[in-house]
Image (spheres, helix red, strand yellow):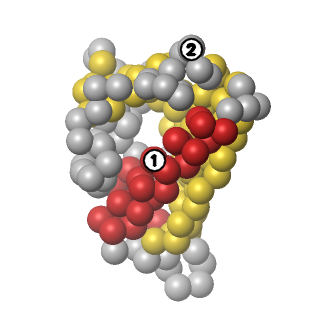
Amino acid sequence: MGQTYQSIVINAPSDRVWQTIRNFHDLSWCPNVITKVEPVGDVPGDQVGAMRVLNGAFHETLQELTDDGRTFVYSITDGPSPVSKADVSDYVGRVTVRPITQGGGTFVEWSYTWQRNDQAAHDFCHTIYCALLGEMKQSLE
């Protein structure tokens, strides 16, 4: 099994961070990484089952959205190599927003797992998610 984990501290209240990122169809907070979000189907971005295509390449489905736990879980059903259907399977990402009790900031975790332990997939995904977290921090601070 392949997996990776990224995290970041954002100097903004966790409620604000969560409200910014919880809509699966709204990635306006990361315009330098995600240039196009295409909702697929009629399910709104704040409901399980919402589907999207990012940058014309990454096909994703929202599997879980928990406001109390400030967590969402999604799957990638297809994308470019090295995360295409031919390269990996059972790709699941999890984003969790946690308040930092001292100082009022936010700790954001972004992890994902997939079947097939492939270094190319790890390196590819790690680069993208580090960029997304950097954009999140920049847009919220």
Residue found at the far front of this picture? 120
User: Residue 61: in sight, yes or no?
Assistant: no
The vertical placement of 7 against 57, above or below, is below
**Residue 99, quarter of the rendered image:** bottom right
> Is 61 displayed left or right of 96 in the figure?
left
The vertical placement of 94 against 12, above or below, is above
Secondary structure, mark 1, is: helix
Residue 69 in the image, given as x and y percentages of width and height: 59, 50
**Residue 53, quarter of the rendered image:** top left
Residue 52 in the image, given as x and y percentages of width and height: 34, 26
Q: Quadrant of the C terminus?
A: bottom left
Residue plotted at (40% across, 46% down): 22
Residue type, label 2: Ala
Q: Which residue is mark 2?
A: 86
Residue type, label 1: Ile
Residue 57 in the image, given as x and y percentages of width and height: 35, 26
Secondary structure, mark 2, is: loop
Q: Nearer the viewer, residue 66 or 40?
A: 40
Residue 128, numbered label: 1
> Is 117 displayed left or right of 91 in the figure?
right
The vertical placement of 28 against 100, above or below, is above
Local crowd size for mark 2, using a 10 Å CA cut-off: few (<14), some (14–19), many (≥20): few
Residue plotted at (30% across, 65% down): 139
> Is 114 displayed left or right of 73 in the figure?
right
